[in-house]
Image: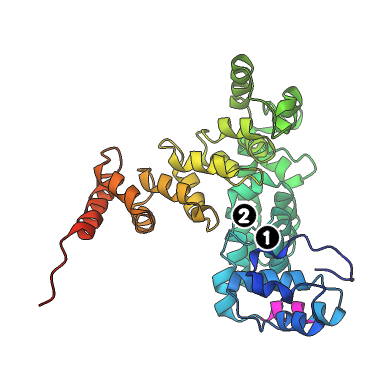
C-alpha cells in the first residue's frame, strides 16, 4: 500500500465501468473517492478489490486510510467470490495477501490463485502458520518458479521438519540449486549421497546460459530462429532441469515458449501458459492444440479474461481434451453458424456434435400454430 501521497498506483482504472471511474479519479471531489474507499459503490466483488487497492494510493490520507480499513474488513461474500478470480490484477491480489495472510481461509484462496505474485507468497512463507506453510509447500510450480519461496519456507521456524524436507527433496530432484540454504544441501546429500558435497551433480544448462547463447530469446519481437539453430536450442532445452525450464518458460520469448509448452512435464507447460509474457495468440493456439497438456487447458478455461474471446471459446469447444461440462457451457454461447458447423463436424467429440445437432433441431423445429 502507499504510505505517502504521490506514489504512483501500478494499475489503471480500465477494469471499472466508465461511470464508476470517478470514484478513483484524483481530480474528482474527495467525497466521491471517499464513497469508493468506504465500499459504497455498486460494483462487483473483483472491481471492489481493485477500487480499494487504487484508493490506497490516493493523495488524501483520509481516503487512503479508509480504503485500507475497508479492504481489511470486507464481508465474506465479496472476498470469497473475488480472491479466487485470476483475472484480477496481480498487484491487487498481492496487496490483499499482505493484508489477509493471517486469515487461513483467505490466505488459501490467494495462494491457490495463480495470478497472486510469487514474491508476496514468499513473504508469507517466512512467517505463516503450519497450515499455510503446507499449502505453499504443495504448490510445486511456485517453488520452482520463485526460489525465494523455498528459502523463506526453510527459514520459517514453524514449518515442520518433514514439510521442509519434502519441499527441499522435491526442489533438488527438479534441479533447483540453492547453495546458501542448509536444508537444500542436506537434501542433496540425502538424495545423492555424501560425495555430492564435494562435487555437485551436473544440472545441465541454466536458463540464463541458454538465453545468453541465444540472445533472440530475450526479445519478444525477434524473428523466428533458423531451423538448424532451433534444433540446437531444442536439444539444449532437453538437457535442462525442470526448474531451469520453468525459468526459461517464464522469462523467455515466444520461441522458447513454443518449444517448452510441448514439454512432457506438466509444471513446465503450465509455467509457459502462466508466463506474464504470453500473448492471446499463443493462448488461442494452445486452446486448439489437441496434443496440449490438460493442465494447460485448465488454466485457459478457468481464466475469465481469456474466455471472453470468442475464438478461444470456440477452440476449447472443438478440443477433445476440454472437459465435456466446460465445452457444453461454451457451446451455448456460440453463434448459430458455428453451432451449425459443429453439428456436421465429425472431428470433434461426439457428445459436442450431438448437442450441437439438438440445438439446431430445436432451432429449426416448426413452431406450433396458436389456435
Residue drawn at the location 69% of the way across and 39% of the way down: 251
288 and 79: which is toward the camera: 288
Q: Are marks 1 and 2 in contact (CB under 8 Å)?
A: yes
x, y (%) of residue 341? Answer: 30, 44
Snapshot quadrant of residue 29: bottom right
**Does 150 appear above or below 108?**
above
- Of labels 1 and 2, earlier in sequence is 2
Q: Residue at x 77, y 45 (%)?
A: 181
Residue 71 among those drawn in magenta:
yes
Q: Position of residue 104 (x, y in %)?
A: 61, 71
Query: Which corner quadrant of the image does residue 68 belong to?
Result: bottom right
Which residue is pictured at 72% across the width and 56% down the height?
122
Looking at the rendered structure, the secondary structure element under dot 2 is: helix
Judging by the rendered image, the residue that carries numbered circle 1 is 159
Question: Any magenta on residue 332?
Answer: no
| Drawn side of residue 192 relative to residue 8, left or right | left
* Residue 55 in the figure: left or right of residue 346: right
Residue bearing mark 2: 137
| Residue interval drawn in magenta | 66-73
| Chief secondary structure of the magenta portion | helix
Amino acid at each position: 500500500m502507499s504510505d505517502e501521497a504521490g506514489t504512483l498506483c501500478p494499475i489503471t482504472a480500465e477494469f471499472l465501468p466508465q461511470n464508476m471511474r470517478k470514484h478513483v479519479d484524483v481530480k474528482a471531489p474527495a467525497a466521491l473517492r471517499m464513497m469508493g474507499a468506504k465500499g459504497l459503490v455498486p460494483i462487483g466483488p473483483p472491481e471492489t478489490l481493485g477500487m480499494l487497492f487504487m484508493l490506497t494510493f490516493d493523495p488524501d490520507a483520509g481516503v487512503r486510510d479508509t480504503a485500507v480499513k475497508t479492504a481489511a474488513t470486507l464481508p465474506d461474500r465479496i472476498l470469497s467470490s473475488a480472491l479466487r478470480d485470476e483475472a484480477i490484477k496481480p498487484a491487487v491480489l498481492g496487496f490483499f495477501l499482505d493484508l489477509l495472510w493471517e486469515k487461513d481461509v483467505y490466505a488459501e484462496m490467494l495462494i491457490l490463485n495463480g495470478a497472486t505474485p510469487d514474491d508476496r507468497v514468499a513473504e508469507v512463507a517466512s512467517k505463516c502458520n503450519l497450515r499455510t506453510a503446507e499449502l505453499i509447500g504443495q504448490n510445486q510450480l511456485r517453488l520452482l518458479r520463485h526460489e525465494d519461496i523455498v528459502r523463506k519456507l526453510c527459514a520459517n521456524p514453524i514449518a515442520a521438519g518433514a514439510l521442509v524436507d519434502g519441499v527441499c527433496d522435491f526442489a533438488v530432484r527438479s534441479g533447483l540449486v540453492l547453495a546458501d540454504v542448509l536444508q537444500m544441501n542436506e537434501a542433496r546429500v540425502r538424495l545423492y549421497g555424501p560425495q555430492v558435497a564435494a562435487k555437485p551433480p551436473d544440472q545441465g544448462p541454466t536458463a540464463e546460459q541458454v538465453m545468453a547463447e541465444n540472445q533472440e530469446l530475450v526479445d519478444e519481437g525477434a524473428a523466428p530462429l533458423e531451423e538448424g539453430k532451433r534444433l540446437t536450442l531444442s536439444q539444449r532445452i532437453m538437457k535442462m532441469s525442470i526448474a531451469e525450464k520453468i525459468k526459461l518458460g517464464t522469462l523467455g520469448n515466444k520461441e522458447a515458449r513454443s518449444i517448452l509448452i510441448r514439454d512432457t512435464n506438466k509444471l513446465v507447460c503450465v509455467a509457459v501458459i502462466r508466463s506474464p509474457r504470453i500473448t492471446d495468440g499463443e493462448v488461442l493456439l494452445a486452446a486448439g492444440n489437441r496434443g496440449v497438456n490438460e493442465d494447460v487447458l485448465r488454466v485457459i478455461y478457468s481464466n475469465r479474461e481469456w474466455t471472453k474471446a470468442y475464438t478461444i471459446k470456440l477452440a476449447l469447444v472443438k478440443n477433445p481434451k476440454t472437459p465435456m461440462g466446460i465445452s457444453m457451457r461454451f457451446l451455448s454461447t456460440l453463434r448459430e453458424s458455428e453451432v451449425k458447423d459443429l453439428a456436421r463436424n465429425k472431428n470433434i467429440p461426439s457428445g459436442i456434435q450431438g448437442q450441437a445437432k439438438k440445438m439446431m433441431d430445436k432451432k429449426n423445429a416448426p413452431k406450433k400454430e396458436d389456435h
